[in-house]
Amino acid sequence: MNCDSILKLLPLYYYGELTPDEEERVEEHAHGCPVCTRELAQQRALAAALDRRKLVAAPTLLEDCRSDLMAAIQGGAPRLARTVKGPWRLFLDAMAASLSGMSSGMSSGAPASGITRLRQPIGALALIAIGFFAARLIHTGPPSGTGALPGSVTAPTDEVYSTVRSVQPDNSGGVAISLDETRRKVVTGSMNDGNIQRLLLAAAHEDNPAVRVESVDLLRSQSGSTEVRDALLNVLSQDTNSGVRLKALEGLKPLAGDSEVRKTLRRVLLADDNVAVRMLVIDLLVAHRDDNMVGMMQGLVQQENNNSVRLKLEKALRDINASPGRF
């Protein structure tokens, strides 16, 4: 590898982004090349200088970031004068101070050709740093919406969350910033509202178990709907959180005599790993006795490993005048 190719890899080498083979080639070359060894030392000094710079966030930092981004997106739209510097100006000032110290150090000993070759890695590092700081300064929270909702009402205080994905210079000397925006919306309505029910049914499958618990708890009052009943059965059979499954069981209590519900209850009694869930299932099955239920419970008593569940089964069978064992 020649000096030009090594110099392009130095920023990646410093941050551990090279493959083991590439790192070995860089180290072998730098070991025998004083120029590249000096460039690597300067790269470390530049990174250390950037790390030492500490910015104190202004109270209006978030507002400044959003205003600066919108101005850049709109092609430099005019802005109202502020008494405090924006985050981009603070960052550029920090970069100027760091690079001025670096250039003065290099001018005293580094050859002109070394400075010229160092421009590319410094530029690359600056772009990486700009993208990193922009994402950290502008992104205030995780995305919290799934797009436009039919019939929803947006309050004037809705928040927009922006995440910078890339920062690149363009041919005209400006900058192109790619960002994702997510708007948080609040939708209100009664439980009889079709849109509210659809949102609750969707929330019952969210990754956050706390959201699922609240959604299923609210859906319990609508268990008479076939769509809600099927959703509760699906939650009872497949949800990984026992608290959510218990909420679904509470909602299915009025439907304990439904044939589809009883089929699911029998499967849950045989397969669920949570004792509280299984014991509540036994109560629901006993509330509507049938011959299939009695035979299944008699067989389960003989092989049940959990003492609490076994005692619950035996008591349930005695209450309906059935023998705990088969004959």
Image: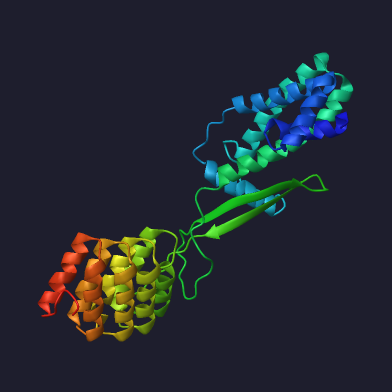
- The number of callouts visible is 0
Q: Nearer the viewer, residue 47 or 193?
A: 47
* Residue sticking out furthest to the top: 108
Q: Looking at the image, is 273 positioned above or below residue 315? A: above
In this image, 47 relative to 290: left or right? Answer: right
Q: Looking at the image, is 44 positioned above or below residue 90? A: above
Q: Nearer the viewer, residue 226 or 289?
A: 289
Q: Is residue 162 visible?
A: yes
* Quarter assignment of residue 204: bottom left
Q: Position of residue 224 (x, y in %)?
A: 30, 83
* Residue sticking out furthest to the front: 327
Q: Position of residue 1 (x, y in %)?
A: 86, 32
Q: Looking at the image, is 37 positioned above or below residue 292? A: above
Tell me, what colour scheme is on the image? rainbow
In this image, 327 relative to 170: left or right? Answer: left
Q: Looking at the image, is 203 positioned above or below residue 221? A: above
Instruction: Identify the residue at horizontal 80%, vertical 44% (top origin).
Output: 173
Q: Is residue 188 visible?
A: no
Instruction: Identify the residue at horizontal 10%, vertical 80% (top origin).
Output: 321
Instruction: Identify the residue at horizontal 69%, vertical 38% (top origin).
Output: 17
Figure quadrant of the C terminus: bottom left
Q: Position of residue 156 (x, y in %)?
A: 46, 61
Q: Position of residue 304 (x, y in %)?
A: 25, 65
